[in-house]
Image (spheres, rainbow, N blue to C red):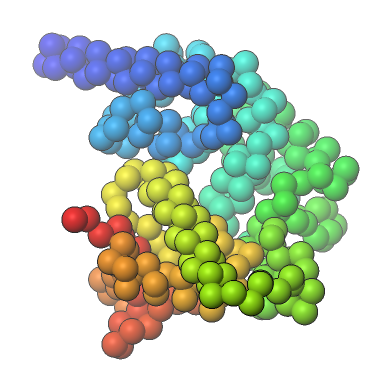
Amino acid sequence: MAGGKEKVDARAAGLGEAMLEKLRSLRETGDVKYPLTLVELASLAAPGARAPQVLAAVRKKAFSSRAIVAKAGRIDAPVAAREDLELLAGSALTLEFALRARRTETIHARTVADLGGWLTSAAKFKELFKRTVKEQVEREQTPPTVAWIVDRKPKLFLLEEIRPRLVRERLVPGEAITAAEQPRAPATAAAPVRAEEDFAARFEEAFDQLDRRKGSHNFVSLVDLRRWFAGLPREQFDAGLRQLRIDGRFTLSAAESVYGIRPEQREAGLEEGGALLLHVSRKTP
């Protein structure tokens, strides 16, 4: 028994060291993906590592003394080196993570205190987070994906939560001008082809990043993909996805059961042949 535990501890220590090394590399090179989520870090440092193994590794003092994870026990939590506490606290990634994690069916907006109180207390991170986000609100410098309303205290929410959809599409990043103000594409035969190529490239990038966040299972929710393309009209997104399916690059699948489907899933899904298609997978040769 003791020998088995020692092997498990050794594997956890090795995985933790590999993740720390990758974290240092991303930090030193100024990679745009830093900070990143724990699942993204694990997929870069040790592809194939399972969530329980990753969580066991970050609990080891060798890892926790040199890195900070925004929320213990969450594989999707943002992570950074201890030297970058302020960077992690003020990161859009951390604020968006907290808002999504604290979202419920009936509550979509949260106070700074509520969000910060839910995060890790390690290295006084939650206090730093609350102070940083309060300053962002006071200076009106929150990330472009986040807004707030005043309900006795400021309550923050993600722009993707705004309803109706027409209003949301006009407010989210990338949708700052109306359709009447949109520059018209040149009247050439090449313009539609170029648009299809641009969408395909952006879709590939979005799919890859979202898939890595979920553990690289080649299974991405249409809800997440539509959020990624929040500034793109629905009909354009659907047309681009349809072409990718025709080209044999991606496929869609339905939920295993119609029970438990959330409203946002129903809104994001595509109805075909009586089925509600909710997930995207890349076709393999």
Quarter of the view holding residue 130? top right
Residue 280, given in percent of the width and then of the height, sits at 35, 63
**Can residue 278 be seen here?**
no
The quarter of the rendered structure image containing the N terminus is top left
- Tell me if 176 is positioned left or right of 55 in this view: right
Q: Residue at x 38, y 30 (%)?
A: 44
The mark total stands at 0
**Can residue 12 be seen here?**
yes
Residue 134, above or below 127: below
Q: Residue at x 14, y 17 (%)?
A: 4
Residue 180, above or below 146: below
The quarter of the rendered structure image containing the C terminus is bottom left
Residue 60, given in percent of the width and then of the height, sits at 39, 17
Residue 213, given in percent of the width and then of the height, sits at 42, 44
Quarter of the view holding residue 244? bottom left
Taking depth in this image into account, of 248 and 8 the one nearest to the observer is 248
Q: Residue furthest right?
A: 139
Q: Residue furthest bottom?
A: 274
Residue 61, above or below 120: above
